[in-house]
């Protein structure tokens, strides 16, 4: 038995390859199948409404592959160079016309000044970090004449680093324990003492000699040199010692003959 179908249900595809699935139609061609049951009235009770969001708050969009991208303004298009003089960077691309810096390649190394003596070689070379590592460190343990006067030394006593420690005038600690003694000229000294130190200031030397004190300059620690240099220095000392002895003998003979 043939079934009657509306021409709106089966439509001819407008182009080749279109789907032949019948479209749904709003018209009901079988009214007997409709339900005659009356519809119920639905009452809606309004609940307490939640606080409305401000209009400025926009819910964040869910990340998907089609909306992923960088933040606005985070990516900037690079400047196009060498694409015509109208762009502003077209002819020489901002590198000038000639010179080493306009050529391709690594250019000049850092600190190079064209062949002249660079700055890092012109400045003086000091030991330590720019000369400041040992510039402010003391080289001696200083003691003034007024401190020696008030220490209570008797005439003929020996003044040295050990005797000053015993008197309590100095109490070196740390690095200062290895430093030598230096006598400074602040104050006066009335007693004659035997003073042993590594160094004397010019003012202290004059005052101590005027007071009749005996000054002894202690030798310092010798700087290490290579054995060959030490041998040459010993030869030089021996040579000049012979010359000084010959000159003294000649001066003594001249004085006797006169």
Image: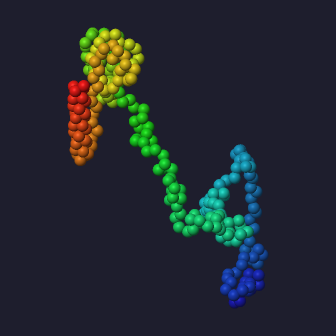
Q: 143 or 234, which is in the foreground?
A: 234
Q: Position of residue 195 (x, y in %)?
A: 29, 19
Q: How many marks?
A: 0
**Residue drawn where x is 21% and y is 25% of the image:** 256
Residue 37: name its quadrant: bottom right
**Residue drawn where x is 32% and y is 21% of the image:** 171
**Residue 129 in view of the camera:** no
Residue 206: name its quadrant: top left
Q: 150 or 170, which is in the foreground?
A: 150
**Residue drawn where x is 69% and y is 90% of the image:** 1
**Residue 228 in view of the camera:** yes
**In the shown orientation, is residue 62 left or right of residue 240?**
right
**In the shown orientation, is residue 120 left or right of residue 256?**
right
Q: 24 or 33, which is in the foreground?
A: 24
**Residue drawn where x is 28% and y is 18% of the image:** 214
In the displayed orientation, state which residue is furthest to the front: 258
Please, is residue 221 above or below residue 43 in the view? above
Q: Position of residue 20 (x, y in %)?
A: 68, 84
């Amino acid at each position: 038995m043939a079934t009657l179908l509306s021409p709106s249900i089966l439509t001819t595809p407008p182009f080749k390859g279109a789907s032949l699935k019948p479209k749904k139609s709003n018209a009901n061609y079988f009214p007997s199948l409709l339900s005659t049951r009356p519809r119920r009235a639905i009452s809606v009770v309004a609940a307490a409404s939640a606080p409305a969001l401000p209009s400025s708050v926009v819910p964040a969009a869910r990340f998907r592959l089609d909306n992923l991208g960088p933040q606005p303004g985070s990516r900037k298009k690079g400047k196009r160079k060498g694409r015509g003089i109208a762009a502003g960077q077209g002819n020489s691309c901002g590198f000038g016309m000639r010179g080493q810096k306009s050529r391709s390649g690594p250019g000049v190394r850092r600190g190079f000044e064209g062949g002249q003596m660079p700055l890092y070689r012109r400045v003086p070379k000091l030991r330590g970090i720019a000369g400041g590592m040992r510039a402010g460190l003391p080289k001696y343990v200083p003691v003034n004449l007024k401190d020696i006067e008030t220490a209570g030394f008797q005439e003929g006593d020996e003044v040295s680093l050990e005797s000053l420690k015993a008197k309590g005038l100095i109490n070196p600690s740390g690095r200062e324990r290895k430093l030598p003694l230096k006598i400074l000229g602040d104050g006066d000294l009335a007693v004659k003492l035997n003073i042993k130190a590594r160094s004397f200031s010019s003012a202290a030397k004059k005052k101590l000699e005027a007071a009749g004190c005996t000054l002894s300059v202690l030798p310092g620690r010798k700087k290490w040199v290579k054995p060959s240099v030490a041998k040459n220095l010993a030869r030089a000392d021996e040579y000049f010692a012979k010359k000084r002895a010959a000159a003294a003998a000649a001066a003594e003979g001249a004085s006797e003959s006169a």
